[in-house]
Image (cartoon, rainbow, N blue to C red):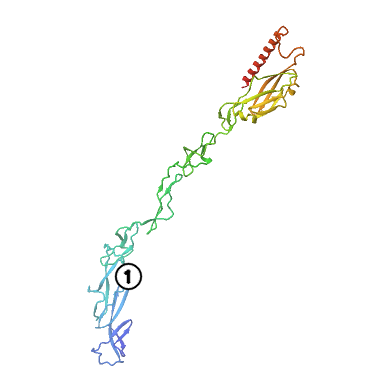
Amino acid sequence: GIETVITFTDDDHKTFNGNVLYYEKGSSAESIEIGEATRINFVTITLKANDGTDTIIEQKESVGVPRNLQVNPFTRKGHSFTGWKNGNGTTYVDQFQQKWETDTILYAQWTEHVYDQTVADETKYRKAAATCTSAAVYYKSCACGAFDPDESGTFESGNPLGHDYKAIAGTAKGPTCTAAGKEADQECSRCHDVINGTEIARLAHTFDQEVATDKYLKTPADCTHKAVYFKSCVCGETGTETFEYGEMLGHSWKAATGYAPKTCEVCGATEGDVINYSSEGENIIEFTQGDKKDVVKIFHRSEDDKNAINHYKGVQIDGKDVPVDAKSGSVIITFDAATLNKLSVGDHIITVIFDDWVEELKLIIKAPVAAAVDATPVTGDSANPFLWTAMILLSMAFAAGIVMRRRKQA
């Protein structure tokens, strides 16, 4: 040992070079008075790391005083500390206590870790918590409980948590007949993984809408048919089935005339017969110049005869308007004798004008009978039977001509 002079005062121990030296009562120094100098022996315990380096720690203790080794200050990667051993092979546990009599060198003893333990300790060995797709990961450990994140290796334990998908608001879209839809996107509440919603096939058109607009018009309404439209889909697409809508227009009749029956001004349909005008008696008027008697002619209308006067417009002789007296009762026209006497001898054409027909008659103006000849045929030798026969045949020929002309016009 090494002798060093230590002076004790009022206590029984002193610190020297980082080591505590104790003065034991009852020892050979017991009679030494406090405050006096004394010589106390101590030893040095050298602790070596024994890890391939020259690291050492020195512990000084009083000779012969029971003291514990300090806690092992060394560590060695991949190894567990098992105790100490001196040069003679004597082993010591950590913090071993004894009376140290001589200087001693102790070597740390190590046992290499074997990381073959799979202990799923959540707080000590867990490397990563379980996720939606992976089980929890732990470090393997040694039987002594040690582990090394760099060397231990890992293992999985337990089951993945599994995804907790929930629909994302506002991402769903219903299908229509013009576009496909899709289900809502899904997001995991744990890892926020997102799955796009599945597409929903486009719907087929349903042509069940009856929308009566020009867009869907097939044929417009006419006199006898309603308007026809194509049915449509809610999207606006036009189908092939049809429906009727609205009312028929109905005919817009133009009154019948002597030229045509009642006719629709829209579609041209006709109904009924033409208007026929006829005069009482023959369509020939004979008048002898000098006669003072007016000529009356009555005309009938085949339809609404009592109001025929409403259709009357006037009379022309040889294309020129002449004044006549016309009144209802069918249409009664009086040809004034004075007017007729102004006409020349011979044939003339009388035109009776209605708003829907023109009726023509033949007017024969005869020369006045000679003064020597009585206007009334006489019997006996003074009469000329040949002259009267000729006049009768001529009158019949004119009448036949007028009738044929009227038939052609009708």
Q: Is residue 265 visible?
A: no
Nearer to me, 8 or 291: 291
Q: Position of residue 394 (x, y in %)?
A: 68, 13
Hey, what amino acid is under mark 1?
Thr
User: x, y percentage for residue 366?
Assistant: 73, 16
Does 154 appear above or below 41?
above
Q: Viewer-proximal residue, 228 or 102?
A: 228
Judging depth in this view, the residue of 237 and 7 nearest the camera is: 237
Quarter residue 395 falls in: top right
Q: As displayed, is residue 378 above or below residue 223?
A: above
Vertical order, 340 against 192 (above or below)? above
User: Residue 59's x, y, as percent?
Assistant: 30, 79
Residue at left offset 70%, top offset 27%: 325
Neighbor class of circle 1 (other Cα within 10 Å; few <14, some 14-19, many 20+) is: few
The reply to whether residue 403 is visible in this rendering is yes
Instruction: Find the residue positioned furthest to the top.
Output: 381
Question: Residue 356: image x %, image y %?
Answer: 63, 28
Q: Quadrant of residue 126?
A: bottom left
